[in-house]
Image (cartoon, rainbow, N blue to C red):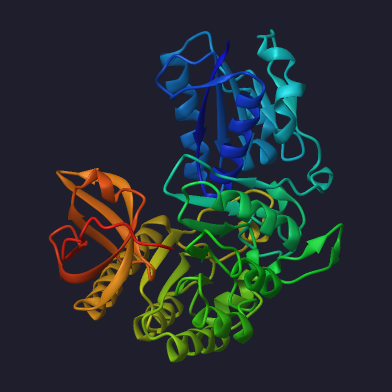
Amino acid sequence: MKRVAFYTLGCKLNYSETSTISRMFEQKGYEKVGFEENPDIFIINTCSVTENADKKCKKIVKEAKKISPHAYVTIIGCYAQLKPQEIAEIKGVDAVLGAAEKFRLIELLDDFAHAQETKVLASEIQDADTFHASHSMHDRTRTFLKVQDGCNYGCAFCTIPLARGKSRSDSVAQVVATAQGIADSTVKEVVLTGVNIGDFGIQEGKRKERLFDLVKALDEVDGIPRFRISSIEPNLLTNQIIEFVAGSKRFVPHFHIPLQSGSNTILRKMGRRYLRELYEDRVAKIKQLMPHCCIGVDVIVGFPGESDELFLETYQFLNELPISYLHVFTYSERANTRAAEMEDVVPMKKRNERSKMLRILSEKKKRKFYEENLGKTWKVLFEEDIENGMMHGFTENYVRVSAKYDPLLINEIKTVTLTEINEQGVVNVVEPEVVFEKH
């Protein structure tokens, strides 16, 4: 029996796909093992959002060959689709599979036999036109459920349409059926994932359904206490969705909404489909209906043309918004994007300085949000995340909490009172009683 190990770089979508591919191997009789357990086969699922992600792939290949020098190394994911020939030149790589091929790798790789030359199976991205349903299982407390793939937007900085193809989705009926299957397991929370979730509903090139249809249907699935939307574009986050989540039985009060810039000048250069006024309106609507809601924000610093003045527009905009945390990305040039050809390049030193400023702001925002929740009672899903005798979990509105370790609490939802923010920036709670609740 051949042993196979997996390593995933990047987003929740990649994790859902890795997990699905690993189950394909197990169904074919392969044994799934840990990365350091001398596997016969390594499958490395890559990201290519930044140049650093590409470097990480090379490092993982090097480590894999140290652990198991004779193992067969296969690279899949966004980096594999964008630069298959570049990967083929990395010492130790046996095969590179593109977006249209990765779900067929078992049948395409001839029992994973070494050859003299690296096998490159990466067709044009136009061929990646089929939606492959995926979800993670047994990897984490949460399940990442892929409902959409690809993107029809053309943001100036982004390679995702080149790496994943056009927008396409599962059907509402099929997603609900998958969720019902997940409900039969021990999973307590499902995170909806995709490249552009708000664009859900395109099948065979035509819009047949909408995200609101999916949210309504999933809210009726018994056996899963929590659904969480991973990320949604502000122009696709409708009042209808916000209002529904505010009164939902299962969708938690947490939105992650990419902004990218608080300057309308930069938003236009980026090719984003909204201006800051719309973003501000979305946040205000959420806070009006759900004052306790957690709002996360993606922001890019150092985009071409971002002067000191325009960066300060972004800083002030974010500082004044009632948001909860930031994911800060330092702009990096990506081949075959419009932004890579733009003038007024921001020096890397200045990009890093701006990134540091926003990360400090993010910590301040998160602490303020946590402070607003102190003394309140929430339900926490405890995870198998143990450190120094303490275990951790998240409330519905994404406050990370800490409690004394108790094995009976793992993967259980417990009602707790948030008491204080500890030195690690995590919220301590009144220790929950180990009494199993009905859901």
Please, which residue is most extreme toward the bottom here?
Answer: 288
Q: Image height check: is 136 above or below 204?
A: above
* Residue nearer the viewer, 296 or 274: 296
Q: Is residue 205 left or right of residue 17?
A: right
Q: Image height check: is 411 above or below 69?
A: below
**Residue 149 seen in the figure:** no
The quarter in which the C terminus is drawn is: bottom left
Q: Is residue 164 left or right of residue 289?
A: right
How many marks do you count on the picture?
0
Q: Residue at x 36, y 50 (%)?
A: 411
* Residue nearer the viewer, 281 or 90: 281
Point out residue 129 in the picture as x, y percentages from the top left corner: 82, 49
Point out residue 176 in the picture as x, y percentages from the top left corner: 67, 59
* Residue nearer the viewer, 260 or 338: 260
Q: Residue at x 68, y 32 (%)?
A: 84
Q: Image height check: is 229 above or below 275?
A: above
Hey, which quadrant is residue 328 in on the image? bottom left
Q: Residue at x 83, y 68 (%)?
A: 208
Q: Is residue 387 left or right of residue 288?
A: left
Point out residue 158 in the picture as x, y percentages from the top left corner: 63, 57
Q: Is residue 191 left or right of residue 296?
A: right
The quarter in which the N terminus is drawn is: top right
**Residue 327 seen in the figure:** yes
